[in-house]
Image: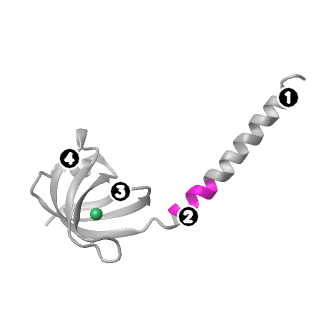
């Protein structure tokens, strides 16, 4: 069976990839902390794929600055406009990805 060694190699590689992916993702998944913040909506990305918010200090996380957050669901951003003051909660998923879990005007 000529193709068997190749198949075995592919299976071994995939198993190895799956194992390393598990190792790579579990620390960040465990560290996916959520934070509450206040800020002002500044602008949106194309199709509201993200929102730039000038956020206030977030204790234990970072000082005040403007940065982007991705909505968990695009509908979360539909009633917002630049200049709106908001309170929001987000999860830091690592690698610069921050997902808004809740956002409301204040
Ligand atoms: Cu920031």
Q: Quadrant of residue 49?
A: top left
Query: 40 above or below 50?
Result: below
Pick the front one: 1 or 94: 94
Name which residue lies at 66% across and 48% down: 18
Residue denoted by label 3: 99
For disc 4, the marked residue is: 44
**In which quadrant will I find the C terminus?**
bottom left
Q: What residue does disc 1 label?
A: 4
Q: Looking at the picture, how far across and down is residue 70, in whole percent? A: 31, 51
Residue 3 position, x and y percent, is 83, 24
Q: Which residues are magenta?
A: 22-28
Is 47 placed above or below 28 here?
A: above
Circles 4 and 3: CB distance less than 8 Å? Answer: no
Cα separation between marks 4 and 3 = 14 Å
Q: Nearer the viewer, residue 57 or 7?
A: 57
**Residue 23 counted in the magenta span:** yes
Q: Which residue is labeled 2 in the image?
A: 27
């Amino acid at each position: 069976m000529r193709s068997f060694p190749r198949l075995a190699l592919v299976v071994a590689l995939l198993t190895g990839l799956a194992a390393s992916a598990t190792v790579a993702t579990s620390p960040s998944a465990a560290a996916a902390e959520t934070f509450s913040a206040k800020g002002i909506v500044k602008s949106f990305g194309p199709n509201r794929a993200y929102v730039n918010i000038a956020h206030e200090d977030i204790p234990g996380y970072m000082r005040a600055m403007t940065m982007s957050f991705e909505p968990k669901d695009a509908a979360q951003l539909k009633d917002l406009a630049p200049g709106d003051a908001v309170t929001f909660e987000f999860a830091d998923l690592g690698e610069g990805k921050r997902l808004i879990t809740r956002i409301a005007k204040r």
